[in-house]
Image (cartoon, coloured by chain):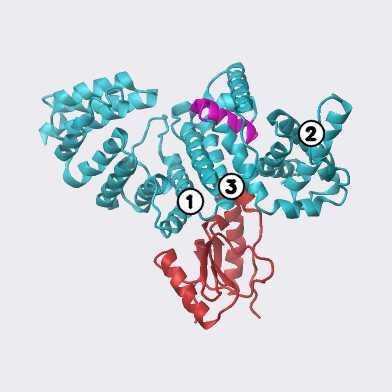
Amino acid sequence: MLYAILCYHDEAVVGGWSKDEDDAVMAKLAVVHGKLAQQGRLGPVARLLPTTAATTLRKDEPPVVLDGPFAETKEQLLGFYVVEAENLDGALEIAQELGRANPGGAYEIRPIGVFHGAFQS
Amino acid sequence: MTDVAWIDAALTSARPQALGALLRYFRNLDTAEEAFQNACLRALKTWPQNGPPRDAAAWLIMVGRNVAIDDIRRGAKQQPLPEDDHAISDLDDAESELAERLDGSHYRDDILRLLFICCHPQLPATQQIALALRIVSGLTVKQIARAFLVSDAAMEQRITRAKTAVAKANVPFETPGAPERSERLAAVAAMLYLIFNEGYSASGDSIDLRSPLCEEAIRLGRLLLKLFPAEPEIMGLAALMLLQYARSAARFDANGALVLLDDQDRTLWNGKMIAEGLALIDKAMRHRRTGAYQIQAAIAALHARAAKPEDTDWAQIELLYGSLDILQPSPVITLNRSVAVSKVRGPEAALEMIAPLAAKLSNYFHFFGVQGAYLMQLGRNDEARESFNRAIALANTSAEADHIRMHLDRLQRDSKPNNAKAAK
């Protein structure tokens, strides 16, 4: 079974870390990542940019693009994609296409700050 | 994190919202501040035992209101109570309800108002900044005094004077209409950029003391962005501050001397901030509603994207400065534009561009520094020396003066008959 581990924290706190504090946390995590990777048990790892950098596509009819993160509590997180695009417009285009295949709900598009791991087919 | 450190962080991040709501309620800054202060004292007492509340800001607002109203009741009986007093009597299980209401649009205007009263047009810029840091950020007078390199007493006086002016200014407490809201937002954005620049223009020994101002401006910028997520100029402002501050570790050498952009060690730039800044400017551009912060951020983004100085897209930067000069005509912007022109079309063209600015910028350090650099590139060394000497006379910091002296020294070496260059 593959598991997704979703990371939650107060972004005001994490965003307030100095570079040294941030580097120290990342270094400690890298040790754990290294161990898991050696055992062949680590898939992609992503660190997202803050929610202020997020854009949300509501997959209504017609779809609506909103600035900011997904803020509703009615819907639940059911999955995610990691895609490559030139810029936000490109990422939104991909999301629109996915949305046409699967309308309803929403996609939050969030740039990724740090990414490790390869794509697997 | 220890209990106390966690509480401290929570109080700081809840402060604008809680204080903003208390101000709306009491309509008096001193009462609101005192109420917030008392609520914080209670938090320090009860949170370690009972654990943190779900919504720290709502807790502080409720407790702050109760304590202040008790004080008013106990003390000056003649002082009238706030009008919607009924909301206060049964508060035991009101926290969740209050939090619900705060989730609405109310607190957005509360925070905006709190920031807005600090940028009253009658207050000089330095007072606006000091007041915002004191009231919104909750820095102590001592901390602010240190950042401004003045005595505690002088800063205390400055803040008291600013508060008196604000109290007389009669800020409206009704929910603002859309045009008023966007006016407030623009004034607040300008003030945040002032705070940022106050920190960013520091140099040498004062850099460690003043860079917290940059961090505070960025924190408030992110807060503003959360409250107004669809405003491209706020995205631009946040991006601009992040992209500039990302370079801070590379801007001064070990001796505190200024390092120009071209000479900076780009590996010292903060990649995390650059990524965030680039994402924000990307997001802002989608709105196709240009503005001064967005253009400046776009310029900073082009610098940030260049791994080496020679990769910089100067032609694009010149175009952006051109748009900025149309949007906000200013000789300083033309001067900056000339730097891009010198890279694209050479120092001769750049000199021609700044010639008409001489009268307007006759007291501006950077004008003579830049002019001297172009003249030096053209080999007009005597004229260059003259410009550099005028720049030194106008320098605002010793780092600026030292930087120009470095050019003068180079001219000195170059003009000696047996210098290294001539020997080649």
Q: What stretch is highlighted in magenta?
A: B121-139
Q: Which mark is residue B38?
A: 2
| Chain ID for red | A
How far separated are the C-alphas under marks 3 and 2?
24 Å
Going 21% across and 41% down the picture, which residue do you hit? B342
Q: Which chain carries label 3?
A: B
| Chain ID for cyan | B
Secondary element at image label 3: helix
Residue with the mark numbered 3: B223
Q: Which chain carries label 2?
A: B
Pointers 1 and 3 in contact (C-beta within 8 Å): no
Which numbered disc flags the more N-terminal residue, 1 or 3?
3
The one of B172 and B23 positioned closer to us in this rendering: B172
Q: Are marks 2 and 1 on the same chain?
A: yes
Pointers 2 and 1 in contact (C-beta within 8 Å): no
Q: What residue type is labelled 3?
A: Leu
Q: What residue type is labelled 2?
A: Asn
How far separated are the C-alphas under marks 2 and 1?
35 Å
